[in-house]
Image (cartoon, rainbow, N blue to C red):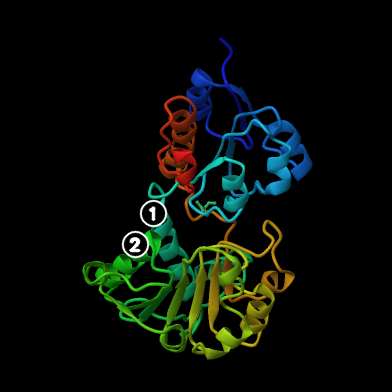
Amino acid sequence: MSKPKVLVARAIFPSVLERLSQHFDIETNQADEVWPKEELARRMSDKVGAFTTSSERIDAAVLDACPQLKIVANMAVGYNNFDVDAMSARGVLATNAPDVLTETTADFGFALLMATARRVTESEHYLRAGKWTKWNYEMFSGSDVHGATLGILGMGRIGQGIAKRGAHGFGMNVIYHNRSRLEPGLEAACKARYVSKEELLRTSDHLVLVLPYSASSHHAIGAAELAQMKPTANLINIARGGIVDDAALAVALRNRQIAAAGLDVFEGEPAVHPGLLTVPNVVLTPHIASASVPTRLAMGNLAADNLIGYLVNGKPLTPLNPEILKK
Ligand code: DGY
């Protein structure tokens, strides 16, 4: 009997491919080309399943070219690359990869916060450029992390992980804003206090963004919000590009309206706003918050488990539109 056809749209660990190939006839992309939308649709047109990353956009036009498609498994917790309504309307299951990356991503949020506050990359560039000829009392003075006020916008699992690191590890005063307030037990575990967005912007020394991207969070941090922040504040974005207005941020950094920023995600990435590339007070990383070897492997395996779970056993692990399963 022939195996169901599955497309693996980007390069992935050979061990994950090996698992998938036990169940499916797989078309792979180990050359890791980022296919234009039309090519993605063409390659997916005879498949029942697809394994994607956040760079593959799955929308109505792509879905209409793929009448046999039953499931798309995203190797990411964020799924703003999926039009879930269009998928549900066509009976296509959407899955993401939550939980397995929570702690690793929270670790990285802290790494970026520390690097930004203590000017790690800026001072390293200075040293590598051979500019360090003498020590000076104020060279690369940054801001303190311990005891400072840590603001978190978006208090899901990753936000809570960051709060715990800040409160328990660094004795920070943790405040947060979220669409809904956490239940008291979770607030106590995170030692976090719920505040309005306005208070969060006004009082945070370090503001970390961990909210999902949607039309309503587009430019949640723009010129008006940056203007409310302290001139000594640091802004960290490990959420999604588009949540921050990168053009407005570049201006705010250049004018020292805020002290510094640490950014792992960008509007229109992998392109980066040119204004961000020329200011010194920003730490820039290429969307790597979940990139530890064990976590990326766990994410790949979870996406594979969703494909196997659904197409072989009828039971996906982390469905985003579970109503499809009842039809
Ligand atoms: C995620 O899982 O959403 C990460 O940002 C990787 O895309």
Depth check, front residue: 18 or 169 = 18
Residue 260: give x, y in percent of width and height: 54, 78
- In the foreground, 112 or 301: 301
Tell me which amino acid carries mark 2.
Gly
Q: Please say whether residue 67 is visible from this viewpoint.
A: yes
Indicate the quadrant where residue 318 lies: top left
Name the foreground residue: 54 vs 62: 62
Query: Vertically, is 242 above or below 294?
Result: below
CB contact under 8 Å: marks 1 and 2: yes
Q: Quadrant of the N terminus?
A: top right
Q: Residue at x 60, y 67 (%)?
A: 215
Question: Is residue 36 among the parts visible in the rendering?
Answer: no
Quadrant of residue 102 in the image?
bottom left
| Up-down relation of residue 279 to residue 44 (above or below) | below
Q: Residues within 10 Å of mark 2 (few under 14, many from 20)?
A: many
Residue 59: mark:
none
Q: Which of the 4 image quarters holds residue 241?
A: bottom right
Q: CA distance from mark 1 to mark 2?
A: 7 Å
Residue 254 locus on image (x, y percent): 66, 83
Q: Could you say whether the residue bearing mark 2 is in a helix, strand or loop?
A: helix
* Residue position for label 1: 102
- Residue at 58%, 62% (x, y): give it: 265
Identify the residue position indicated by label 2 in the image. Answer: 161
Q: Is residue 85 left or right of residue 300?
A: right
The amino acid type, in three-letter code, at marker 1 is Thr
Name the residue located 68 percent from the left edge and 56 percent from the top edge.
Answer: 270
> Quick one: label 1 or label 2, which is nearer the N terminus?
1
Q: State yes or no: Cβ of the residue under disc 1 lies below 8 Å from any atom of ligand 1.
A: no
Q: Position of residue 168 (x, y in %)?
A: 25, 69
The local secondary structure at tag 1 comes to helix
- Residue 43 spot, x, y in % from top left: 72, 32
